[in-house]
Image: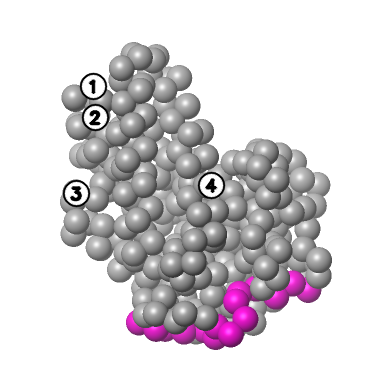
Amino acid sequence: MSDYLLQYEATLRAGSFVAILLVMMLVEWLAPRRPRSLPRAQRWPTNLGLIIFNTLVLRLLPFMAATSVALHAEQQHWGLFNLLEIPALFSVLLSLILLDLLIYWQHRMFHAVPILWRLHRVHHSDPDLDVTSGGRFHTVEILLSMLIKMLAVILLGVPVVAVILFEILLNGLAMFNHSNVAIPTSLDSLLRKLIVTPDMHRIHHSVLPLETNSNYGFNLSCWDRLFSSYTDSPAAGQLGMTIGLRGFANAGMIALLLQPKRKD
């Protein structure tokens, strides 16, 4: 089963990514939450270029694949779930929850450690927020994140199917919660009891440090409440808040890849 899933992993992930990207682009066009400060043509080539470049880098480094590590751990009976022989469905569900918790703390670490923040601020320097912002990350951050996930997969013995599902969910929900989509307040309040919504995550991209250092979750919204990093609404309101980082203007892809050299 695991070998079969690995054969179609690239197709499953690429297909889901393109489908969600196109749907969210359409919804943003039909029901935008905020007016844009810059035209799409000034931002999308950079954001989409980073997504394509990072994907190619990971594909050119086959050893940087959490699914391959999961398969090897399964075959060697490495990791907690393999040693305890936990029922398959339970191990998949528990893996999704624990990996999401890991990503939450990884995100907080990239804000707290100065050298890691210099990588992560590439993501925060986007002056607008939309579906393409969900994949705007420095290549080194992507590689470090993959190494952290690979270590967690080995230690936990995460099933291959859980790794694939988690990657699809992580990419899909990142595009959703970074999107510039207007969701009715009542529906947003209901959704954010379980998942991170665009209005919830947008606060994390505020220029105000107290707001930037909150709402770290990507998938499940419970972690921010549980670990006291939840902000319900921005001080200036969703339409009045300023997105991005002060002192960082819109930049091209090469400039973003070199941005961590800036020490300010």
In the rendered structure, are the residues bearing label 1 and label 2 in contact, judged by CB atoms less than 8 Å apart? yes
For the residues labelled 3 and 2, the Cα–Cα distance comes to 14 Å
Image coordinates for residue 5, horizontal then vertical, percent: 26, 34
Cβ–Cβ under 8 Å for marks 3 and 2: no
Nearest to N terminus: mark 1 or mark 3:
3
Check whether the beta carbons of the residues at disc 2 and disc 4 lie within 8 A of each other: no
For disc 4, the marked residue is 104
Magenta-colored stretch includes residue 128: no
Q: Is residue 120 visible?
A: no
Q: Quadrant of the N terminus?
A: top left
Q: What residue type is labelled 3?
A: Phe
- Left or right of residue 95: residue 199: right
Give the SS element for disc 2: helix
Q: Which of 261 and 101 is in front in this view?
A: 261
The magenta stretch is 240-256
Which residue is under mark 1? 77
Examine the image and state in which quarter residue 209 appears. Answer: bottom right
Q: What element carries label 3?
A: loop
Position in image of residue 195 (x %, y %): 63, 43
Write down the residue under mark 2: 73
Indicate whether 193 appears above or below 134.
Answer: above
Whether residue 47 sits left or right of residue 14 in the image: it is right
Is label 4 in a helix, a strand or a loop? helix
Q: Say which residue appears at 62% left-offset and 81% top-offset.
A: 246
- For residue 63, the mark is 3
Above or below for 123 versus 39: above
